[in-house]
Image (cartoon, rainbow, N blue to C red):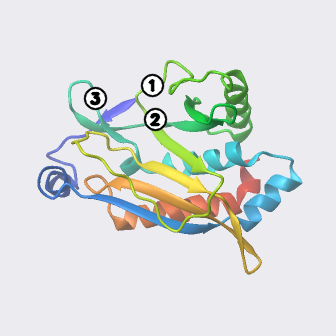
C-alpha cells in the first residue's frame, strides 16, 4: 500500500523541497559492519550468507518510512508499507549479472525459502532483469564478494526522482578477531538525514548480531 503524504503536515516538507529543488544533495557512506556473531549463527544453522544478509537489510529498512519513500503515478510523494529487495546475481560463465527480486516476507524462513527458489529458478537467465514483474516498491542491493573496499561512490549525470536507498556490500574480512564487511548506502538527502542513516546502519548491524530471534 502507498501512503500519500500531506505536504502541509509533513514535518520534513521544508527540508524535502530544499534538498530536492535547491541543493540537490545525495549522501554516500561506507562503514565496516561487525558481522561476527551473525556469521556464527549462520554457520551453526547451515544458512547461506546472501539470503540471510538481504533479509537483515530489508528487515531494518522496512521499519523506517524514510527509506521507503517514492512518488506515485500521479507524482504524489508518499511511502510504501514495505519494500521488496531487488538484488544482483553473477553469471561466472560470461561475467555478466542479472537483477532479481523477491517478495518481502517478515518471516525469515519464508523469505529465505522464496529468495533461494528465485535464485535457483532464474540463475541461467542472462538478462539485466531476469525475473519479470518487479513492483515499484523495491530497494536495489548489490554485492562485490571479490573485494573489501573502504569507499564507494555513484556517478549520475541526470536528474532522478528515485528516493529509495541504493546498497552495496563487499567481501568480509578479519579485523583483530572480529569479522567485518564493507557496507555502503546511498541516500537522497531530501528524505533522510545523517541521523536516520546512522540509525538504519546500527539497526542492520544489531539485526545481524541478534539474528537468532528471527529464526
Residue most toward the front?
94
Residue most toward the top?
132
Separation of residues labelled 3 and 1 (CA atoms):
12 Å
Separation of residues labelled 3 and 2 (CA atoms):
13 Å
Residues at badges 3 and 2 in contact (C-beta under 8 Å)? no
Judged left or right of residue 13, residue 131 is right
Q: Nearer the viewer, mark 3 or mark 2?
A: 2
Q: Secondary structure at mark 3?
A: loop
Judged left or right of residue 70, residue 159 is left
Residues at badges 2 and 1 in contact (C-beta under 8 Å)? yes
Sequence-wise, the earlier of marks 3 and 1 is: 3
| Residue 102 lies in quadrant | top right
Residue most toward the bottom?
176
Which residue has dot 3 on it?
72
Q: What residue do we see at 66% from left, 23% from top?
A: 122
Sequence-wise, the earlier of marks 3 and 2 is: 3
Which residue has dot 2 on it?
138
Q: How many marks?
A: 3
Which residue has dot 1 on it?
135
Amino acid at each position: 500500500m502507498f501512503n500519500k503524504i500531506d505536504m502541509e503536515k509533513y514535518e520534513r516538507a521544508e527540508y524535502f523541497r530544499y534538498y530536492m529543488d535547491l541543493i540537490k544533495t545525495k549522501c554516500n557512506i561506507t562503514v565496516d559492519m561487525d558481522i561476527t556473531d551473525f556469521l556464527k549463527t549462520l554457520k551453526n544453522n547451515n544458512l547461506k550468507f546472501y539470503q540471510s544478509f538481504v533479509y537483515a537489510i530489508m528487515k531494518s529498512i522496512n521499519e523506517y518510512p524514510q527509506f521507503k519513500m517514492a512518488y506515485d503515478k500521479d507524482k504524489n510523494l508518499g511511502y510504501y508499507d514495505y519494500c521488496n529487495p531487488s538484488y544482483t546475481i553473477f553469471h561466472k560463465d560470461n561475467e555478466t549479472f542479472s537483477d532479481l527480486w523477491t517478495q518481502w516476507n517478515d518471516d525469515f524462513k519464508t523469505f529465505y525459502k522464496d529468495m533461494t527458489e528465485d535464485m535457483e529458478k532464474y540463475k541461467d537467465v542472462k538478462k539485466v532483469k531476469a525475473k519479470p514483474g518487479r513492483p515499484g516498491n523495491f530497494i536495489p542491493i548489490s554485492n562485490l564478494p571479490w573485494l573489501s573496499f573502504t569507499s564507494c561512490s555513484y556517478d549520475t549525470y541526470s536528474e532522478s526522482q528515485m528516493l529509495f536507498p541504493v546498497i552495496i556490500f563487499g567481501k568480509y574480512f578479519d579485523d583483530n578477531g572480529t569479522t567485518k564487511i564493507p557496507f555502503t548506502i546511498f541516500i537522497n538527502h531530501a528524505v533522510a538525514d545523517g541521523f536516520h542513516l546512522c540509525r538504519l546502519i546500527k539497526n542492520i548491524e544489531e539485526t545481524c548480531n541478534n539474528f537468532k530471534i528471527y529464526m
